[in-house]
Image (cartoon, rainbow, N blue to C red):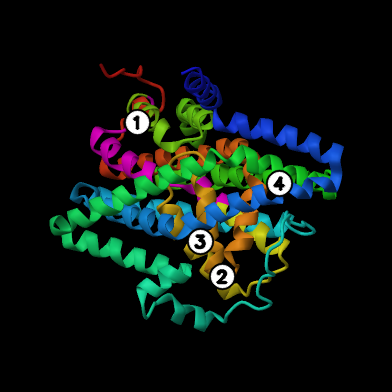
Amino acid sequence: MTSDTDRSLVARYWTGFALWKRIFAALLLGTAAGLLFGEAMLALAWMGELFLRLIRMLVVPLVLSVVVSGLAGLGDPRRLGSIGIRTLLLYLFTTACAVGIGIAVAMLIQPGVGVVLALDAPPPSAEAPGFGRQLLEIVPVNPVDALAKGAMLSVIFLAILVGVGCILAGEEAQPLVKLFDAAAAVFLKLVGLVMELAPFAVFALIAIAVGTDGFAAFLSILKIALCVVIGVSVQLGVVHAGLVRFGARLSPLRFFRNASEAMLMGFSTASSSATLPVVMQVASDRMGIGKPVVSTVLPLGASMSMDGTAMYMAILCLFGLQAFGVALSPAQLLLMAVVTMTVALGTAPIPGSSLFLIAGILASIGIPPEQAALIVAFVLPFDRPLDMIRTVPNVTSDLAVATVVARHEGELDLARFNGEADPVRQP
């Protein structure tokens, strides 16, 4: 009886701390262990390898289920009317800009150059398949075989077709939609379970990295953080501000002042879905956006407007390519950008979910899952503050698109937006 009570107390004590705090503590302990014991920490390599194998195990079913679920979720007729079409196009535009900015910043700063990732893994292909061959391989001759082999381009293509088919089939496809919704929920729960092992894996991986390379590994993380900060700043100050200025003919400064409460909430929670109630309240009370737009544009944005996530995935993919010495042709870089956009649209709006989808993007350009998993493990200890930063453009994208749509639909109270009328709090 006492033993059961003790186990219960340990479990509650362990889960009573936020995961990011446990990971940060493991980071500190791993750094200290690496400095004290040096290369002897290589004996813990199996802990990191176990975690990496679990990541690889979940990638294919997770990508398939979340992309189908995300696309099929757009089939609600209320979301696909005149407001919905304009909203979808604007969200695709901002996401494309985010991916382009992420690639450009990573190519400029080159955070992956000189990085040596821990653990043994087979070397990446010396030459990625040609662009024409990649296009042909997108269409699987046998979808089941593509799933079994983890042919990620084929998996994503299949997921897109199934999602579009669900939209076209309408009500008859609802049982299948519910199945993929349930599958996405299950695999995201499994991701949560795997993440409970993250502190142990982080301890081992950081101890190995510091024990073999000293503090050199942290310099690359600082470069990644610099890429994220610069990219987010450009996305906010150029893309979103420009969208408000030229798309809605309104003051960007006023927009950001109105949006500040939602931006702070997004930064603190690192979750677009958790911030949605505040975003809807800000849109209605501070910006004067009408209910038809608030109830249509913002819930849609919480599930598919992932500017910061798309940018972050693009930066990490370039980081990995640079670390492994893989150079892409312009056509292959474009293909990677398109795949990144597609995967970002299906990313769950919860902290850390994007990391597990990076392997799918890298697999589409010839990077084996072993290398992709190494990148995830390398960045994982530092993901929480980066996640907080990249959630901010997710939030401002929702509000910027809602403002533009409301302006064109005649659903914007200019006096409220400009602060000439007192905010009205809804009961």
**Disc 4: CA contacts within 10 A as few (<14), some (14-19) or many (>=20):** many
Q: Viewer-proximal residue, 88 or 143?
A: 143
**Which badge, 4 or 3, is on the more N-terminal residue?**
4
Alpha-carbon span between mark 1 and mark 2? 38 Å
Indicate left or right for 176 with 417 as reference.
left
**Residue 292 in view of the camera:** yes
- Observer able to see residue 411: no
What percent of the width, then of the height, locates residue 357? 50, 54
Secondary-structure class at tag 3: helix
Residue carrying label 3: 360
| Residue 59 vertical position relative to residue 217 in the rendered view, above or below | below
In space, the residues marked 1 and 4 are separated at their CA atoms by 41 Å
Residue type indicated by callout 4: Leu
288 in the magenta segment? yes
Name the residue located 36 percent from the left edge and 50 percent from the top edge. Answer: 184
Query: Compared with residue 120, is residue 228 higher up or lower down, i.e. above or below?
Result: above
Please report the residue visible at 56 percent of the width from the left and 39 percent of the height from the top.
387
Which region is colored magenta? 286-312
Estimate the spatial distance between the alpha carbons at disc 3 and disc 1, rounded to whole Å: 32 Å
Residue 272 is a magenta residue: no
Q: Foreground mark, 1 or 2? A: 2
The residue at which mark 2 appears reads as 365
Q: Nearer the viewer, mark 3 or mark 1?
A: 3
Judging by the rendered image, the residue that carries numbered circle 4 is 205
* Tag 1 residue: 280
Provide the major secondary structure of the magenta segment: helix
Q: Amino acid at mark 2?
A: Ile
User: Residue 414 appears in which quarter of the rendering?
Assistant: top left
Local crowd size for mark 3, using a 10 Å CA cut-off: few (<14), some (14–19), many (≥20): many
Indicate the secondary structure of the residue bearing disc 2: loop
Relative image position of residue 264 (x, y in whole percent):
52, 27
Task: For marks 3 and 2, give the CA distance.
Answer: 9 Å
